[in-house]
Image: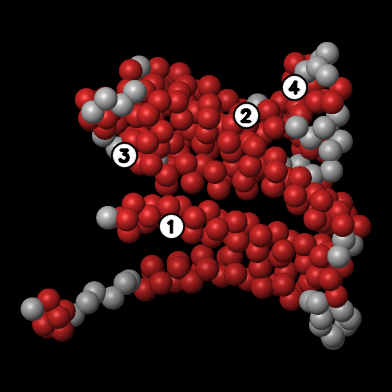
Amino acid sequence: MGSLIAVLVPRKRPPISATVWLVAAAAFFVVPLAATIEFSLRTGASSHGVAAYGTILHDPQFWSTLWLSTRLALETIGIALVLLVPTLFWVHLRAPRLRPLVAFLCVLPFVVPPVVLVVGLLDVYRGAPEWFIATPQFLVAGYVVLAFPYVFFSLDAGFRAIDLRTLTEAAQSLGAGWRTTLLRVVLPNLRAAALGGALLTFAIVLGEFTMANLSLFNTFSVYVNYVGQTTATPAAALAVISFVLTWGVMFAFVTVSRRRGATPAEGR
């Protein structure tokens, strides 16, 4: 019956203006990317090759800085989630009037420039052990602060999308404590929200330049800036590689999240 109705009732075509805007938006993203890829493949006036990509991939600084930024990003994601998930759980459940205050505090990094933030961190860490100040772990605290707005609003949307009070009362009526309720009842329902915040945080840490440069740490963004100032074609190749890496990480996060979400259903 449904197929018969679909045949008898013609589908509405999207308006021409919507198609034009869609094509324009696609061209806005695709044309610069295609131009960057074409330039990265140039080896002469009229010849093309992958020599620039080989130069980047065989550079030890590329792999060391990429691993450093990835490690800092994972640490930042873990700390930000540990801090904000219990906080928002308590705020949404027990103190909803405090949500505007928590939102205001988390939005402050939008107002405070990274230059001011790193200077403040240097003052706060005055007298800290040398093994901490002299290592890139110094940057994690600043990155957590920078990630607060994105993680907060992602988790806040996730908490608003679920019936938190009903889930909590049902779990506690079955004998679950607060820790079990948070870890085994609430968190599985926040998987998509936590994933969104994690992806945004990863992108921020991977591309953050000001704090790392002022702190004299050679992260991936500092390496990208150095290559961009010293070479032309390898810089374009590095931009393409960074684009592919970012999308690859996003795809990996989404794939892992979907598999974990499908596991309980498959077990049933």
Where 176 sits versus 153, above or below? above
Residue 156, image x, y percentages: 41, 33
Q: Earlier in the sequence, mark 4 or mark 3?
A: 4
Give the spatial CA distance, label 1 vs label 3.
21 Å
Quarter of the image holding residue 162? top left
Of the numbered discs in the image, which one, if any, rests on residue 259? 1
Q: Earlier in the sequence, mark 4 or mark 2?
A: 4
Residue at (49%, 28%) from the top-left corner? 84
Give the spatial CA distance, label 1 vs label 4.
39 Å
What residue is shown with label 4? 121
Q: Is residue 170 left or right of residue 43?
A: left
Name the quadrant of the C terminus.
Answer: bottom left
Q: Nearer the viewer, mark 1 or mark 4?
A: 1
Mark 1 Cα-neighbour bin, 10 Å: few <14, some 14–19, many ≥20: few
Residue 31, image x, y percentages: 63, 71
Q: Earlier in the sequence, mark 1 or mark 3?
A: 3
Q: Are marks 3 and 2 in contact (CB under 8 Å)?
A: no
Q: Earlier in the sequence, mark 1 or mark 2?
A: 2
Give the spatial CA distance, label 4 vs label 2.
11 Å
Q: Are marks 1 and 4 in contact (CB under 8 Å)?
A: no
What residue is shown with label 3? 161
Amino acid at circle 4:
Leu
Q: Is residue 62 left or right of residue 9?
A: right
Mark 4 Cα-neighbour bin, 10 Å: few <14, some 14–19, many ≥20: some
Res 157 seen here: no
Q: Earlier in the sequence, mark 3 or mark 2?
A: 2
Residue at the outermost top position: 127
Quarter of the image holding residue 237? bottom right
Judged from the image, the secondary structure of the residue bearing numbered disc 3 is: helix
Residue 227, image x, y percentages: 86, 56
Where 213 sits versus 50, above or below? above
